[in-house]
Amino acid sequence: MEENELLKMEHVDICRDENVVLSDISLTVRRGEFVYLIGKVGSGKSSLLKALYREIPIEKGQAQLLNFDLTRLKKREIPYLRRKLGIVFQDFQLLTDRTVFKNLEFVLRATGWKKRAEIETRADEVLTRVGMPNKGYKMPHELSGGEQQRVAIARALLNTPALILADEPTGNLDPETSGQIVQLLHDLSKAGTSVIMTTHNYTIVHNYPARIVKCENGHLHEVRE
């Protein structure tokens, strides 16, 4: 891998339940790059992201992500990979029984943060970065969908990831809020955090242009606008 490359996949097959979802795919993502992963529902977009954070193993080909060899990664090494990634889901996946701050604190403590003052400072930093300062006391149900997704992105930023994997992050949001979330992700990429975002919303892709890679018929190919 070259110095500015975060991800390099060559001739990779991705399987789910012994079925090949994507075959012979190659993909390179560089630092600070924003990449849309588009395609129909069931085309393999989410499977590709799951292979990157090793929920699905890669059996064939070569795949390196952040200096981890995804084809040889041992189970005990997976948490160390995931700590270097930020993962954002369509349905937010916030813990509904605790405040925004407690959601962030839970992740920080789980990844080795111990000092209360440092935890509070970091939580405030990421909430401010996503436009949610002073919302740490709120419960998730008190927030709009767009606000919950901002908190989910803040959570993804806690351990300063080099790459954010955003799986249909606007899937449950109205068009205006979707645009705000995508703009936020673009701003993060311009500040140096690479983003791979899956979507089948072509309006977003058109309104917030970036590199496009398409999952289609079991393969991956670049789309030139």
Image: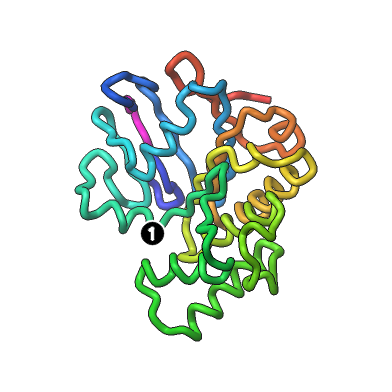
Residue 100's place in the image compared with 40, above or below, is below
From the image, give the main secondary structure of the stretch colored magenta: strand
Q: Is residue 149 magenta?
A: no
Which corner quadrant of the image does residue 214 belong to? top right
Q: Residue at x 68, y 45 (%)?
A: 182
Q: What range of the chain is rendered magenta? A: 9-13
Q: Position of residue 143 (x, y in %)?
A: 69, 58
Residue 139's place in the image compared with 162, above or below, is below
Q: Is residue 10 magenta?
A: yes
Q: Residue furthest front?
A: 97
Q: Is residue 163 left or right of residue 114?
A: right
Q: Residue at x 49, y 82 (%)?
A: 118
Q: Position of residue 73 (x, y in %)?
A: 23, 46
Q: Nearer the viewer, residue 137 or 60?
A: 137
Q: Secondary structure at mark 1?
A: loop
Q: Dot 1: few (<14), some (14–19), or many (≥20) neighbours within 10 Å?
A: some
Q: Is residue 51 left or right of residue 131?
A: left
Q: Residue at x 55, y 32 (%)?
A: 37
**Which residue bears the numbered disc 1?**
83
Q: Nearer the viewer, residue 69 or 109?
A: 109
Q: In the rendered view of the protein, which quadrant contains the C terminus?
A: top right
Q: Is residue 128 left or right of residue 83?
A: right
Q: Nearer the viewer, residue 41 or 29?
A: 41
Q: Residue furthest top?
A: 217
Which corner quadrant of the image does residue 133 belong to? bottom right
Count of marks, rendered view: 1
Q: Amino acid at mark 1?
A: Arg
Q: Residue at x 56, y 49 (%)?
A: 92
Q: Position of residue 181 (x, y in %)?
A: 69, 49
Q: Position of residue 45 (x, y in %)?
A: 49, 30
Q: Is residue 19 left or right of residue 103?
A: left
